[in-house]
């Protein structure tokens, strides 16, 4: 029996891919282990959005290069963008494979183990092949992600995704519903429809043709179909691009009770000049109009966002525009990062790169501002009852941690095991990164 160990870096799409990869290898007779020192095959599945993930990968490979592993494979976005350079940076690597080729991994591992190939590289864009080649999920949890769309056509000037994940494509509705039914039949109760840009979804509709062409569904129709499946209790989607967010999707939140009143709409910057430089396709005023319209249609809705500080050419006034936008929106949760140049993107070649020290100062100011909004929202939930899905134990005895509909961490104490259960919780107090409650 050949054993394997997988370490995953980066976004939830990478986590989703890694789980699919593990199920595929197990179906081929491999055994998954949790300790890299016990593995015949080491697999590192990586992100390439920020330089930090690349450094971490190379550090981990260097740290583990003396283990008894017979094969080291690196996959994901960094493998797609770096290609042969990976072998130069880490000579112990045997296999480099892109995010659209992991269904070929068992074949490549076999070739290396048999001595037929010492090094293999595959950066082909197979698109749907990997979804069709992977078996159904083995260990289904109460909350599961389903990839409905992958790739991106937006070509933001800072982003490597269109070059590593490829152009946008959407999975057929039939395939998504079949996967959703399987997950729900085997214990899932919360489903998250996932993609680089889910609100540009246009999947082939089931059993419907118009003339000689297959009809397509948008995400609004897909959400309505998934919401009707037996066993589902909570429904989410992520991530959305502001320019593609329309009123039809806003109204769906009122039409589907189990669709959470929360969505992630990354703005990246509040400066119109920087947004144009980023090629985001909207202005700050257009972004704010959509969020205000959303709140008008669905008063319970709350937002999270992503921010990049220190984009090339960002002035102090540009940064203040971002702070002003944050002040208007009042985000529930947000994620903010220093701009990190990625090789091959237009922004990496732009002049007037912002010094690291200024990036760090601006990031600290922005994060402090976002944190204050987060604390304010947390405090607003005190004395309210929230439905919470519990997914892990806390640090203390009898302590459990879950997520409410707004993706906030909720901490309770309970004599009973709450893992994998939905419970109504009365919020008693609020802290910076969580709220404390009592099971009703």
Image (tube, rainbow, N blue to C red):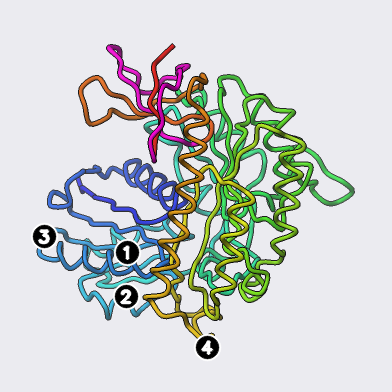
In the rendered structure, does residue 212 fall within the stretch colored magenta? Answer: no
Which mark is in front, 4 or 3? 4
Q: Are marks 1 and 2 in contact (CB under 8 Å)?
A: yes
* In the depicted structure, whether residue 396 falls above or below residue 340: above
Image coordinates of residue 280 in percent, x first then y, are 65, 67
Image coordinates of residue 380 in percent, x first then y, are 52, 31
What residue is shown with label 1?
74
Residue depicted at x 30% and y 15%: 414
* Quadrant hosting residue 75: bottom left
Q: Are marks 4 and 1 in contact (CB under 8 Å)?
A: no
Residue depicted at x 56% and y 32%: 180
What residue is shown with label 3?
67
Could you say which is closer to the camera, residue 52 or residue 366? 366
Marks 4/2: CA–CA distance: 28 Å
Marks 4/1: CA–CA distance: 32 Å
* In the depicted structure, whether residue 68 falls above or below residue 122: above
What residue is shown with label 4?
351
Mark 2: few/some/many CA within 10 Å (<14, 14-19, 20+) = many
* Quadrant hosting residue 51: bottom left
What residue is shown with label 2?
86
Image coordinates of residue 28 in percent, x first then y, are 33, 45
Mark 3 or mark 2, which is nearer the start of the sequence? 3
Which mark is in front, 4 or 1? 4
* In the depicted structure, whether residue 46 falls above or below residue 80: above
Element type where label 3 sits in the image: loop
Q: Which residues are magenta?
A: 407-432
Mark 3: few/some/many CA within 10 Å (<14, 14-19, 20+) = few
Marks 3/1: CA–CA distance: 16 Å
Mark 3 or mark 4, which is nearer the start of the sequence? 3
């Amino acid at each position: 029996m050949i054993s394997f160990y997988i370490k995953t870096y980066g976004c939830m799409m990478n986590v989703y891919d890694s789980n699919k990869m593990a199920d595929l290898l197990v179906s081929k007779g491999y055994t998954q282990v949790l300790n890299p020192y016990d593995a015949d095959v080491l697999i590192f599945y990586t992100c390439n959005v920020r330089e930090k993930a690349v450094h971490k990968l190379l550090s981990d490979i260097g740290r583990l290069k003396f283990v008894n592993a017979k094969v080291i494979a690196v996959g994901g976005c960094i493998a797609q963008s770096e290609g042969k350079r990976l072998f130069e940076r880490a000579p112990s690597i045997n296999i480099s494979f892109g995010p659209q080729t992991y269904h070929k991994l068992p074949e490549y591992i076999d070739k290396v183990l048999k001595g037929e190939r010492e090094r293999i590289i595959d950066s082909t864009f197979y698109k749907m092949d990997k979804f069709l080649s992977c078996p159904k999920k083995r260990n289904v949890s109460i909350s599961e992600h389903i990839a409905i769309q992958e790739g991106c056509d937006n070509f933001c000037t800072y982003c490597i995704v269109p070059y590593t994940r490829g152009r946008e494509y959407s999975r057929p509705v039939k395939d998504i519903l079949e996967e959703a039914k399987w997950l729900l039949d085997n214990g899932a109760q919360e489903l998250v429809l996932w993609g680089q840009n889910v609100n540009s979804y246009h999947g082939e509709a089931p059993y419907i043709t118009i003339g000689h062409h297959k009809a397509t569904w948008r995400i609004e129709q897909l959400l309505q179909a998934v919401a009707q499946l037996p066993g589902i209790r909570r429904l989410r989607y992520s991530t959305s691009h502001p320019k593609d967010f329309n009123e039809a999707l806003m109204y769906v939140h009122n039409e589907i009770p189990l669709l959470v009143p929360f969505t992630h709409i990354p703005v990246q910057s509040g400066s119109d000049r920087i947004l144009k430089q980023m090629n985001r396709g909207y202005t700050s005023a257009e972004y704010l109009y959509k969020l205000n319209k959303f709140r008008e249609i669905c008063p319970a809705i709350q937002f999270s966002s992503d921010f990049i500080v220190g984009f090339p050419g960002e002035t102090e006034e540009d940064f203040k525009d971002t702070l002003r936008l944050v002040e208007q929106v009042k985000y529930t949760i947000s994620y903010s990062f220093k701009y990190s140049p990625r090789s091959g993107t237009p922004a990496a070649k732009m002049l007037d790169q912002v010094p690291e020290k200024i990036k760090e100062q601006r990031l600290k100011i922005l994060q402090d501002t976002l944190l204050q909004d987060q604390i304010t929202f947390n405090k607003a939930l005190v004395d309210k009852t929230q439905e919470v899905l519990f997914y892990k134990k806390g640090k203390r005895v009898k302590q459990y941690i879950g997520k409410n509909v707004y993706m906030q961490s909720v901490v309770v104490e309970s004599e009973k095991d709450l893992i994998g259960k939905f419970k109504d919780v009365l919020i008693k107090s609020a802290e910076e990164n969580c709220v404390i409650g009592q099971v009703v």
